[in-house]
């Protein structure tokens, strides 16, 4: 029983967390981008320190090699002049410096590898942040569109209202024209009274005209012409 209740509570908490994440998705995205940029800045600072140490090691390595070369030449000169005691002392110093040179070479090699790995990680992180920013722009656009759609639904500008308005327009436009209806009724009445056949016969030249025509108007205008 308690296990079932715990499962239900955990499920409800998970759903509540999802709702919160959905509601504040844009804010969370911006926060994650800021955190990523902060991590990237820290990585850049570390890389700068590594490169600085790398350059210092390179200088010391080169200086040590130069000292070994110089002391080796001097020891050779001492041997050439039968000063084996000084040559032996120089040899001990050279051996110590060569051991140090080996250690510095190993340190320099490790630094080179660290710099390469960190530089690659920084480049990858930089590209990912650019992608995140582009994704954030798209997410904001989608969120604005969703907000507009929700606002349209709340204000009654959804599909239902649009369809209802279109239906009302069609009903208004589809109604019969009362003037046309009255003209049709007048024609029907004239047919019943025989007026229509009289007009047609008058137009054909049988009997006097029952109505004015364009020819009559034109003839009247010509007769009044001076």
Image (cartoon, helix red, strand yellow):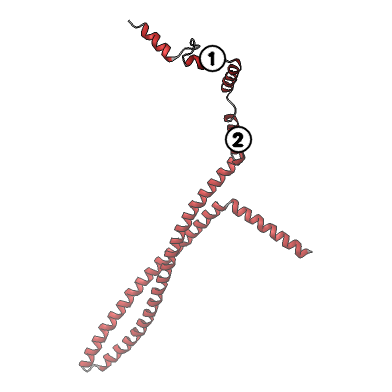
**Residue occupying image coordinates x 57% and y 24%:** 177
Residue 118 visible in the picture = yes
Crowding near pointer 2: few (<14 within 10 Å), some, many (20+)?
A: few
User: Which residue: 54% across, 52% down?
Assistant: 26
Residue 192 falls left or right of residue 74: right
**Nearer to the camera, 31 or 79:** 31
Query: Is 115 or 91 nearer to us in this picture?
Result: 115
Q: Which mark is residue 48?
A: none
Q: Position of residue 108 (x, y in %)?
A: 37, 76
> In the rendering, which numbered label is found on residue 198?
1
Q: Position of residue 58 (x, y in %)?
A: 33, 74
Q: Nearer the viewer, residue 194 or 143?
A: 194
Horizontal and vertical percent for residue 131?
Answer: 46, 58
Q: In terms of depth relative to the viewer, which is nearer, 18 or 112?
A: 18
Quadrant of the image occupied by residue 213: top left
Q: Nearer the viewer, mark 2 or mark 1?
A: 1
- Residue farthest left in this picture: 81
Residue 156 appears anywhere in the view? no
- Under circle 1, the secondary element is helix
**Residues under labels 2 and 1: Cα distance?**
45 Å
Label 2 residue SS: helix
Is residue 169 positioned above or below 183 on the image? below
- Residue under label 2, please give it: 167
Mark with earlier residue (2, 1): 2
């Amino acid at each position: 029983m308690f296990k079932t209740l715990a499962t239900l509570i955990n499920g409800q908490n998970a759903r509540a967390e999802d709702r919160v994440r959905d509601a504040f998705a844009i804010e969370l995205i911006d926060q994650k981008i800021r955190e990523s940029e902060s991590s990237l800045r820290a990585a850049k600072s570390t890389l700068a320190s590594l490169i600085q140490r790398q350059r210092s090691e390179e200088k010391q390595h080169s200086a040590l090699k130069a000292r070994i070369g110089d002391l080796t030449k001097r020891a050779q000169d001492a041997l050439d002049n039968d000063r084996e005691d000084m040559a032996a002392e120089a040899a001990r110093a050279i051996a110590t410096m060569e051991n140090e040179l080996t250690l510095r070479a190993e340190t320099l090699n490790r630094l080179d590898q660290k710099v390469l790995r960190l530089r690659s990680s920084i480049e990858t992180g930089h590209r990912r942040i650019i992608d995140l920013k582009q994704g954030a722009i798209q997410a904001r656009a989608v969120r604005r569109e969703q907000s507009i759609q929700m606002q349209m639904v709340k204000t009654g500008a959804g599909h239902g209202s649009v369809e209802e308005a279109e239906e009302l327009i069609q009903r208004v436009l589809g109604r019969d024209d009362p003037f046309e209806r009255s003209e049709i009724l007048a024609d029907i009445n004239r047919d019943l009274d025989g007026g229509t056949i009289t007009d047609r016969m008058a137009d054909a030249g049988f009997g006097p005209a029952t109505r004015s025509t364009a020819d009559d108007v034109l003839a009247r205008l010509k007769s009044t012409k001076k």
